[in-house]
Image (cartoon, rainbow, N blue to C red):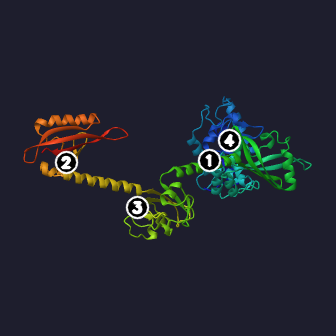
Amino acid sequence: MPALNADDIKGLVRRASGRGHTGSRNRALVSAFVGAGLGVSEALSITVGDLDESGARVRIGGGRGRSVAVEPSVMAALTTWVEARRNLGLADAAGPLFCTRDGLPLEASYVRRLIARLGREAGIDGVVNARTLRESYAAARLADGATVEDLREELGHASIASTQRFVRQLGGVPAPRTMMGSDLASALFGVAHAGLTVLRAERGADGAITDFIMEYVNPAAAGILGRAPEDLPGASVRDVFPNSPSDGTYARWIELIETQGAAGAPRLYESEGRTRLFRVRRLAHGDRILMSFEDQGAARAAERAAGQLQARQTAYLECSQNGVFIMEPNGTIAVANAAAHRILGIATGRLVGLTPLDPRWRPTMPDGSPIDPAELPAALTRSTGQPIRDRELAFTRSDGRRSWISVSTEPVETGGGAPFGVAATFTDLGTLRRVSARARACEEAGRLMQAVSGTILLRCRPDLTVVHASGPVAQLLGRTPDELVGSRCTDWVDDEDRQAVRDVHLHALESRDSVGIDHGIRDGSGTLVSVSRVVRAVRDPSTGEVEEIQSVIQQQK
């Protein structure tokens, strides 16, 4: 329902007859709603002691609440009810102002029904409620020239944004209070990182500046000053900085206004229990000074933190055994660590400025087959923004040697999409490949020797379960190596020798010796075959834990 006009409000108040105790109370109650912009719970919380008859003000919310000025007619209705209340024997100043004859608080439901009934009796179209009266109060105050800031204080809103929404719902336009009256400017200044303050010069009868008033203070500035944001607007600078008139500050500000100039300098302020360095800038605009405060200590701390982070990153890059480089979106290498230069065979510092497509490296697939430059990991990530993991490549070093690497890449998002920057890491596979080749050669040589000598090699877990069998096992036992895997290495030992073989394995587990034994085994046909067995435990060199037990078995001639 739209806000009520003045005639509707007068008719509503008249409908509360004012006759008798109940009429007097109800007229005072309705007058408080329309004259102070109250909510139902606020009205019922007011005590007799909250009335300031001499100042024509009503305190709402107790000692820490707000104080609202009311029209003389509203205060007259309230004081009339206070007198009627005393005549009922209710003289307690701390008791509820609006109460029953017994001094008990009114029910909120009774108040809502009362306002709706009076609205119907006054002939007002639509349902009248406490919200309607609160909006009517706000609309009347706006029409009288009140600002959004005024309404925020009078209505008890927690933030200026709540009052702005309230005003927009009324369709009202708040009157500008100062040059800072723009809602957009206030919102922008409110979220600014720097402290922002507007000072207004106060002039005496002779036109001379006598004081400066804090007209606007954003949350960042209030935090720097160590004050609540709501305590500063309207405060004299003398109260906030008692020494400012005598320490030359006022003189500098007066000169700034007279010259309409600007100034800036570092200043030390006590903030958050410590002395901090701020960069202060001032600009005169008429009789106002706009000031900004930027925490130079925070900026310097941020610079130190950034430097420390860069140093840690550099240390990590340089101590890494993996090659690392970072490629700009234009395709050139901007950062490369020492390992990258070593693996790629490039002199220290010479990688920066090159590209992964440099022809001197002649990259190929690991088997030597050619690779399209556009399919290289760095090129794919640069064009698609997708990471690549563990791609193996071969390339030619500057010394002519062929080498292999495993490459992983990650896009570096720069905000502009493709082409992307690229971070790449790569591991030298050359050493690994050479070690693997030697291991394969040794393994093949071992197999050849076992075949020539007729020796069987059994590898068992510590619980004696066979995991590998090699050599002429088929000829000796009549079983294939695969058939032995999963069995226990004592399963085909002759019954009379089985415990002795177990004891040999136990001795090998507990010692670091090679232990030998002669015993019999049964081949696939059950025939007893005499063999010699040597057993040794294989241990982890770092922990000493037994990894497996190896047995070499050879038929006795």
Whole-angstrom CA distance, mark 4 to mark 1, is 64 Å
Circle 2 or circle 1, nearest the eye: 2
Of 161 and 420, nearer the camera is: 420
Q: Is residue 154 above or below residue 145?
A: above
Determine whether the residue tagged by mark 2 lies in a helix, strand or loop: strand
Query: Residue 182: where, in percent of width, then height?
Result: 71, 57
Residue 320 appears left or right of 252: left
Read off the residue under disc 1: 305
Residue denoted by label 3: 392
- Which badge, 2 or 1, is on the more N-terminal residue? 1
Crowding at dot 2, Cα within 10 Å, few <14 / some 14-19 / many 20+, comes out as many
Asked whether the residues under the numbered discs 4 and 1 touch, taking CB atoms below 8 Å apart as contact, a structural biologist would say: no
Left or right relative to 343: residue 464: left
Is any atom of residue 497 visible in this view?
A: yes
Q: On residue 28, which mark appears?
A: 4
- Residues 82 and 333: in front is 333
Mark 3: few/some/many CA within 10 Å (<14, 14-19, 20+):
some
**Picture layout, residue 402 above or below residue 523:** below
For the residues marked 2 and 1, what is the alpha-carbon distance in whole angstroms?
65 Å
Q: Earlier in the sequence, mark 2 or mark 3?
A: 3
Q: Earlier in the sequence, mark 4 or mark 1?
A: 4
Say which of 270 and 156 sits in front: 270
Residue type at mark 3: give it: Glu
